[in-house]
């Protein structure tokens, strides 16, 4: 009987050693503040940065061919073309993270486009290019008889389960 008792004591001692060895791991786990929802711990910066990146790429891609395809007299058509090229990407952004509880709302901001035009397009005889116009949130300028897109203004709101953030973005195509 002594041999069975020694084995039982050995198993108990081994279990106690394992428990003592795991105690620091458990304490570190508790101190790190693990949260199953990663987006809750990373703040709301990631969805906002994603929206900014997508809008920058979308505006660049949607405006790249405008100068070669639209004369200044066709600037309204150029604005409509830019908006129609942007719409699928804006729709994709709007529905991108709905299943995870994050909703993007993106709309054009006409007044921000007009304000950007007023502060960034010089008037008078010293300007290098032609006049600027703002229509439907898109700022265009006449350059050598062609229509160039200078900026597109958006209102963006990102809403999650715990918080919401909103801003106005004036996105310039990368030249």
Image (cartoon, rainbow, N blue to C red):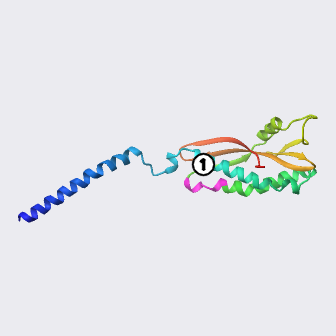
Q: Where is residue 37 in the image (x, y as percent from the top left)?
A: 48, 51
Q: Is the magenta stretch mostly helix, strand or loop?
A: helix
Q: Residue at x 55, y 54 (%)?
A: 100
Label total for image: 1
Q: Where is residue 62 in the image (x, y as percent from the top left)?
A: 78, 55
Q: Which residue is drawn at 84% across and 51% down?
A: 79
Q: Is residue 161 magenta?
A: no
Is 61 displayed left or right of 14 in the figure?
right
Q: Say if residue 67 shows up in the picture.
A: yes
Residue sitting nearer the eye, 145 or 166: 145
For mark 1, does the 10 Å Cα neighbourhood hold few (<14), some (14 to 19), or many (20 or more) residues?
some
Q: Residue at x 66, y 53 (%)?
A: 94
Residue beneath label 1, please?
A: 47
Is 35 displayed left or right of 138 in the figure?
left
Query: In terms of image quadrants, where is residue 127?
Result: top right
Q: Where is residue 19 in the image (x, y as percent from the top left)?
A: 25, 53
Which stretch is magenta?
Answer: 93-100
Q: Say if residue 136 shows up in the picture.
A: no
Q: Is residue 99 magenta?
A: yes
Of helix, strand and loop, which one carries label 1? helix
């Amino acid at each position: 009987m002594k041999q069975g008792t020694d084995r039982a004591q050995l198993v108990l001692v081994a279990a106690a050693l394992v428990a003592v060895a795991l105690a620091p791991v458990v304490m570190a786990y508790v101190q790190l503040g693990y949260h199953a929802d990663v987006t809750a711990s990373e703040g709301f910066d990631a969805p906002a940065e994603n929206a900014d990146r997508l809008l920058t790429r979308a505006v660049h891609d949607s405006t790249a061919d405008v100068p070669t395809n639209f004369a200044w007299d066709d600037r309204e058509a150029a604005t409509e073309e830019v908006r129609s090229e942007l719409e699928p990407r804006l729709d994709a952004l709007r529905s991108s993270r709905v299943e995870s509880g994050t909703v993007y709302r993106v709309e054009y901001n006409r007044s921000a486009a007009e304000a950007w035009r007023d502060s960034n397009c010089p008037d008078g005889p010293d300007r290098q290019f032609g006049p600027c116009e703002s229509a439907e949130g898109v700022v265009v300028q006449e350059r050598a008889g062609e229509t160039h897109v200078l900026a597109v203004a958006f209102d963006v709101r990102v809403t999650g389960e715990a918080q919401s953030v909103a801003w106005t973005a004036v996105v310039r195509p990368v030249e």
